[in-house]
Image (tube, helix red, strand yellow):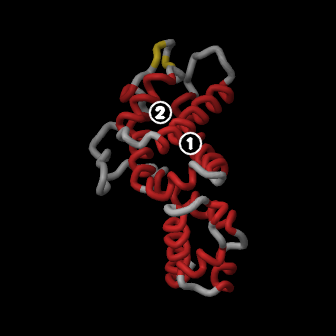
Amino acid sequence: MDRRQKKTRQAVFQAFTSLLEKKHYSKITTQEIIERANIGRSTFYSHFDTKDELLKALCTEIFNHVFVDNLSRESTHDFSAEPISLQAEITHILYHLQDSRHYLRGLLLSESGEMFIKHFKDYLVDIFRKNLKDSCMDVPADYMLNHVVCNFAETVRWWMQNGEYSPEDVSRFFFTVSCLLHEGGTVIGHSSVTKN
C-alpha cells in the first residue's frame, strides 16, 4: 500500500470509529462512513467490499497493535522494564483496549460484538497456548486453551460494561478466579508465569 492508500484507509477507520462512538454498528451506513471520511464511493469500495469487511480490517488493525511481541513504553503504560510474564502481557493488552475504549465499547456491546470477539479470540489463542503447553491438569489441552481464551474474552466484554476498574484490576480479577494455569500441580498466580 502506498502512502496515499494508507492515508485513505486511516481516514475510513477514523470515520468508522467516530460513528461507533455515537451509534450501533447496524445503524451505521456505508454512505455515512464515506461522507465522514470525505472520500468517494468508488474509493471506499476499492478498499472494502462491505461494512463487515471494514469491521474485520479494523479488528486486524487494532490487534496488530495490541498483540506485539515486545512490551514497550507507551503514553499510558510502560512494561518495557518488567520481566516478561503472562500477567504483564495480559495487562498490556488491557491498557491498549482501554486506550480505544471510546469506540470499542460500541463494538463490543452491539451485534458487532460477536465478530469482534471471534477475531479477538483468534489472537488470544497464541498468547495462552505457550503458557498452557506444560500444564499437568488432567484435561485435554485444547479444552483448557478454549476455556481460558473464552474466559478472558468474556472478561473484556464484562469490563467494557463495568469500566470503573483499571487494567491492573481486571488482570488481577482474571488471574484470581481462573485458577486454570498450572505448573507442577500448583496454581500459577500473577507474575510467576514466564515465557518458555
Helix, strand or loop status at disc 2: loop
Q: Tell which residue pokes out farthest to the left in this image.
A: 81
Q: Tell which residue pokes out farthest to the right in this image.
A: 49
Residue type, numbered disc 1: Leu
Q: Which mark is residue 196?
A: 2
Near-viewer residue (196 or 58): 58
Q: Where does residue 24 sit, x and y in percent of width and height?
A: 60, 59
**Alpha-carbon neighbours of circle 1 within 10 Å: few (<14), some, or many (≥20)?**
many
Q: Is residue 165 above or below residue 59?
A: above
Helix, strand or loop status at disc 1: helix
Q: Where does residue 158 sit, x and y in percent of width and height?
A: 51, 38
Residue type, numbered disc 2: Asn
Q: Where does residue 54 sit, x and y in percent of width and height?
A: 63, 67
Residue that appears at 44% across and 21% down: 188
Distance from disc 1 to disc 2, alpha carbons, whole Å, reads 17 Å
Q: Is residue 120 above or below residue 8?
A: above
Q: Which residue is mark 1?
A: 124
**Quarter location, residue 87:** top left
Question: In the rendered image, which quarter contains the N terminus?
Answer: bottom right
Residue that appears at 30% across and 49% down: 77
Near-viewer residue (4 or 11): 11
